[in-house]
Protein backbone atom coordinates (compact mmCIF):
# COMPACT_ATOMS: atom_id res chain seq x y z
CA UNK A 1 0.00 0.00 0.00
CA UNK A 2 1.23 3.47 -0.77
CA UNK A 3 0.47 5.64 2.23
CA UNK A 4 1.44 8.71 0.19
CA UNK A 5 -1.81 8.32 -1.77
CA UNK A 6 -3.97 8.31 1.36
CA UNK A 7 -2.29 10.94 3.53
CA UNK A 8 -2.05 14.58 2.51
CA UNK A 9 -0.97 17.89 3.98
CA UNK A 10 -2.56 21.16 2.88
CA UNK A 11 -2.18 24.50 4.65
CA UNK A 12 -5.90 25.12 4.10
CA UNK A 13 -7.02 21.92 5.83
CA UNK A 14 -6.63 21.46 9.60
CA UNK A 15 -3.87 24.06 9.71
CA UNK A 16 -1.59 21.97 7.54
CA UNK A 17 -1.61 18.88 9.73
CA UNK A 18 -1.35 15.60 7.84
CA UNK A 19 -4.86 14.25 7.27
CA UNK A 20 -6.42 11.26 5.59
CA UNK A 21 -6.98 12.34 1.97
CA UNK A 22 -10.46 13.61 1.24
CA UNK A 23 -11.27 14.04 4.95
CA UNK A 24 -10.50 16.36 7.81
CA UNK A 25 -9.41 13.47 10.02
CA UNK A 26 -5.87 14.15 11.23
CA UNK A 27 -3.31 11.38 10.96
CA UNK A 28 -2.46 11.82 14.64
CA UNK A 29 -6.08 11.16 15.60
CA UNK A 30 -6.07 7.85 13.75
CA UNK A 31 -2.74 6.88 15.29
CA UNK A 32 -3.97 7.84 18.77
CA UNK A 33 -6.91 5.47 18.29
CA UNK A 34 -4.55 2.68 17.27
CA UNK A 35 -2.31 3.41 20.26
CA UNK A 36 -5.37 3.25 22.53
CA UNK A 37 -6.04 -0.26 21.28
CA UNK A 38 -8.86 0.38 18.83
CA UNK A 39 -8.98 -2.05 15.94
CA UNK A 40 -9.45 -1.01 12.32
CA UNK A 41 -13.19 -1.79 12.31
CA UNK A 42 -13.77 0.34 15.41
CA UNK A 43 -11.88 3.30 13.98
CA UNK A 44 -13.82 3.11 10.71
CA UNK A 45 -17.07 2.91 12.66
CA UNK A 46 -16.10 5.97 14.75
CA UNK A 47 -14.95 7.95 11.70
CA UNK A 48 -17.37 7.06 8.87
CA UNK A 49 -15.41 9.12 6.32
CA UNK A 50 -12.51 6.65 6.65
CA UNK A 51 -11.99 3.35 4.91
CA UNK A 52 -10.05 0.40 6.29
CA UNK A 53 -7.19 1.12 3.89
CA UNK A 54 -6.95 4.66 5.29
CA UNK A 55 -6.30 3.28 8.77
CA UNK A 56 -3.77 0.79 7.42
CA UNK A 57 -2.04 3.61 5.53
CA UNK A 58 -1.76 5.60 8.77
CA UNK A 59 -0.15 2.61 10.48
CA UNK A 60 2.19 2.09 7.53
CA UNK A 61 3.16 5.76 7.62
CA UNK A 62 3.94 5.56 11.34
CA UNK A 63 6.00 2.40 10.90
CA UNK A 64 7.95 3.91 8.02
CA UNK A 65 8.54 7.14 9.92
CA UNK A 66 9.75 5.29 12.99
CA UNK A 67 12.13 3.19 10.93
CA UNK A 68 13.57 6.24 9.18
CA UNK A 69 13.57 8.99 11.81
CA UNK A 70 13.77 7.60 15.31
CA UNK A 71 17.01 6.22 16.66
CA UNK A 72 16.72 3.03 18.63
CA UNK A 73 17.53 3.45 22.30
CA UNK A 74 20.89 2.06 23.24
CA UNK A 75 21.05 -0.66 25.85
CA UNK A 76 23.24 -0.14 28.84
CA UNK A 77 25.22 -3.24 29.68
CA UNK A 78 25.76 -3.58 33.42
Image: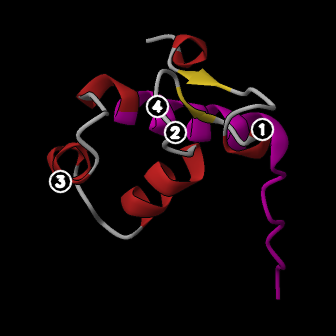
Horizontal side, residue 43 vs residue 42: left or right: right
Q: Earlier in the sequence, mark 1 or mark 4?
A: 1
Q: Are marks 2 and 4 in contact (CB under 8 Å)?
A: yes
Q: Earlier in the sequence, mark 2 or mark 3?
A: 2
Residue 50 position by quadrant: top left
Q: Earlier in the sequence, mark 2 or mark 1?
A: 1
Range of the magenta residues?
55-78
Give the residue displayed 50% in from the left and 19% down from the top.
6
Image spot of residue 76 (x, y percent): 84, 79
The Cα atoms of the two marked residues, 2 and 1, are separated by: 11 Å
The Cα atoms of the two marked residues, 1 and 4, are separated by: 13 Å
Are there few (<14), some (14-19), or many (20+) residues within 10 Å of tag 2? some
* Residue underneath mark 4: 23
Of the numbered discs in the image, which one, if any, rests on residue 42?
A: 3
Give the quarter of the figure containing the C terminus: bottom right
Horizontal side, residue 36 vs residue 63: left or right: left
View extreme (front): residue:
12
Of the numbered discs in the image, which one, if any, rests on residue 54?
A: none
* Residue underneath mark 2: 24
Q: Nearer the viewer, mark 3 or mark 4?
A: 4
**Under tag 1, what secondary structure?**
helix
Residue 16 or 74: which is nearer the viewer? Answer: 16
View extreme (bottom): residue:
78
Of the numbered discs in the image, which one, if any, rests on residue 16?
A: 1
Give the residue displayed 50% in from the left and 56% down from the top.
29
**Under tag 4, what secondary structure?**
loop
Q: Earlier in the sequence, mark 3 or mark 1?
A: 1
Amino acid sequence: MKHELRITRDAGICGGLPVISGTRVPLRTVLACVAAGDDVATIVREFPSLQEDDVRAAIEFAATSAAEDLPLPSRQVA
